Image (spheres, grey):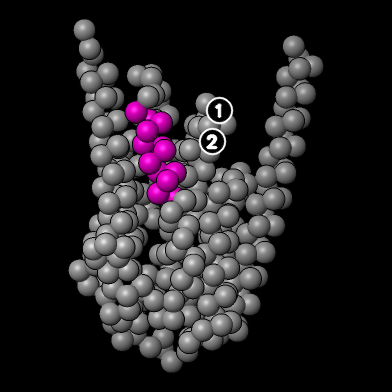
Amino acid sequence: MLTKGVVMGKAWRIVVAVSAVVAVVGAFVGSGAVVGTPIQDAAGGALSASSTAIAPDGPAFSIWSVVYVGLLAYAVRQCFRTADDARHARLALPATLSLLLNAAWILSVQFGALWLSEPVIVALLVVLVWTFAVLRRTTASGVVEQVLTDGTFGLYLGWVCVATAANTAAVLAAAGFEGFGLGQDVWGVVVALVAGLVGVLLAVWGGGRLAPTVSLAWGLAWVAVGRLDGPLVSVPTAVAAVVSIAAVVLVTLVVRTRVGWVGARRGAGAARVA
């Protein structure tokens, strides 16, 4: 006889799988491949590579393909989890919310509701931080789990940090905000450095996890490329983006090395006690 917990577990597996399909369909619409308008052209081009100083250049968005493949793989993986897999049970709700919010963000932009895209992407960022918290408090069952779950959501979080900054700048610019007269260079530098600070905090909090650093650095790298070559040139912003990348990568490696040393010392101590 099936217990209530088993039934709920199966229901959540279906919910996560369906949400992943919804997110991927939304991404297909957002790509403009067959229907819909490419995101960079939607909402009057407010999210194009030259809309604001912090907008990443076009190729940056190719990382979504990797994230979506990972999310689909995660959805398949969690369908086969055991009933007592507490890690995936705790991930089910935030993972589902992230997938649905992703689709909601794309739809809001597609329908030209740029103002609505801001609370949606901020909510997505909050949910991904929640997901990251669950991942760091629980242990992956193996290498496959680390890649499909921790790796995918780490990339997802790092990229959405950059996307949130770009989206916020686009919404403010579309609303006529002129930056208190400080100009694109100043705001570009400030936002790029803040993004770097967020990356450093994630590196410290996550114990030097590589995935968030890789995707955040990827996004900032394309911000730098876009500011050095394109309609909107801002050398100060490009320099700030590169400095932020260097800081995030350095802190990640230092923290990761330190965590490895601590783990090795604890293992040696346990062996001596045994």
Query: Three-letter amino acid code at disc 1?
Result: Gly
Return the residue found at the far bottom: 181
User: Looking at the image, which residue is at 57% across and 64% down?
Assistant: 196
Confirm or deny contact between disc 1 and disc 2 (CB under 8 A): yes
Q: Position of residue 156 (x, y in %)?
A: 45, 51
Number of on-image labels: 2
Residue under the image location 34 percent in, 28 percent down: 79
| Callout 2 amino acid | Gln
Out of 79 and 121, give the one closest to the viewer: 79
Q: Residue at x 44, y 81 (%)?
A: 50
User: Residues in magenta?
Assistant: 67-79
For residue 25, side relative to residue 274 (left or right): left
Q: Residues within 10 Å of mark 1 (few under 14, many from 20)?
A: few
Task: Name the quarter where the N terminus is drawn.
Answer: top left
Q: Position of residue 14 (x, y in %)?
A: 26, 32
The residue under label 2 is 146
